[in-house]
Image (spheres, rainbow, N blue to C red):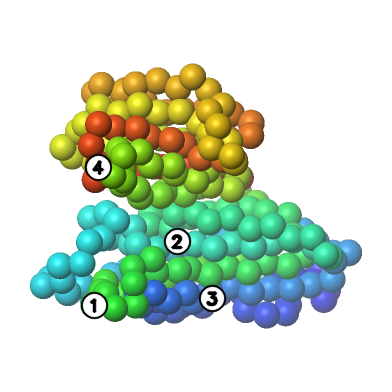
């Protein structure tokens, strides 16, 4: 494609990402009349430094779980975007004339680490791959309730209660906080592991009998 998207901008780079920072990995633009399917490949991040003496809380013990990919694409005056997990690497195809990809470190700037090296590339064409995910970490508040915002493009969600397990109720609510579904109760680990997200859902509401119960909520994205 002469003058196409991949002939302008940055088609791939390696960056170092520190706590509280976001770094751009890919930026390509082209003629809106020549939009094609573009495939982004994000490599699994490499840990460069971890401070073993840090007492700061972290979302997960999994290396790279502090990172979130920020992908935006479109053509003409229309664009959309999505947040996705990059901890194990991602290969994702989208139709676009312009595309940008950044990665954000979700720990506060004051955190001593870890520091990551991230890399990504973009090319023409498509390939089959696993569905991307977006993980959100949450803890119940003083009333034992937490609302976890539904990620963009999410079709399903898995709920992982962190140890020690505490029984919890779940249900989806709309933008006004009103229940959309009857929901259910999980009395053992894995009981409400996979849920289909109904139309109009704004958040997944988790209810326990105590404050400070931790969850990892993994949204499956329909991309």
Crowding at dot 4, Cα within 10 Å, few <14 / some 14-19 / many 20+, comes out as some
Question: Which residue was labeled with disc 3?
Answer: 24
Q: Residue furthest front?
A: 143
Q: Position of residue 185 (x, y in %)?
A: 34, 21
Q: Which mark, residue 68?
A: 2
Q: Earlier in the sequence, mark 4 or mark 2?
A: 2
Q: CA distance from mark 4 to mark 2?
A: 26 Å
Q: Earlier in the sequence, mark 3 or mark 4?
A: 3
Q: Earlier in the sequence, mark 4 or mark 1?
A: 1
Mark 3 residue element: strand
Q: Position of residue 156 (x, y in %)?
A: 51, 34
Crowding at dot 3, Cα within 10 Å, few <14 / some 14-19 / many 20+, comes out as many
Question: Which residue was labeled with disc 1?
Answer: 112
Q: Nearer the viewer, mark 4 or mark 2?
A: 4
Q: Is residue 212 above or below residue 200?
A: below
Contact (Cβ within 8 Å) of mark 4 with mark 1: no
Contact (Cβ within 8 Å) of mark 2 with mark 1: no
Q: Earlier in the sequence, mark 2 or mark 1?
A: 2
In depth, the one of 190 and 204 nearer the eye is: 204
């Amino acid at each position: 494609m002469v003058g196409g998207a991949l002939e302008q901008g940055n088609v791939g780079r390696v960056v170092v990402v520190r706590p509280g920072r976001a770094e751009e990995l890919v930026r390509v633009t082209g003629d809106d009349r020549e939009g094609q399917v573009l495939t982004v490949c994000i490599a699994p991040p490499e840990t460069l430094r971890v401070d073993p003496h840090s007492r700061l809380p972290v979302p997960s013990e999994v290396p790279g779980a502090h990172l979130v990919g920020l992908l935006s694409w479109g053509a003409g005056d229309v664009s959309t975007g999505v947040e996705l997990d990059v901890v194990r690497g991602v290969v994702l195809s989208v139709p676009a004339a312009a595309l940008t990809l950044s990665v954000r470190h979700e720990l506060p700037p004051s955190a001593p680490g870890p520091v990551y090296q991230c890399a990504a590339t973009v090319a023409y064409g498509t390939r089959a791959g696993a569905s991307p995910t977006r993980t959100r970490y949450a803890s119940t508040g003083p009333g034992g309730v937490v609302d976890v915002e539904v990620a963009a493009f999410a079709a399903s969600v898995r709920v992982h209660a962190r140890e020690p397990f505490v029984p919890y109720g779940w249900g989806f609510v709309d933008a006004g906080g009103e229940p959309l579904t009857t929901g259910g109760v999980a009395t053992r680990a894995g009981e409400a592991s996979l849920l289909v997200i109904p139309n109009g859902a704004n958040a997944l509401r988790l209810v326990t009998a105590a404050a400070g119960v931790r969850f990892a909520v993994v949204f499956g994205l329909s991309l």
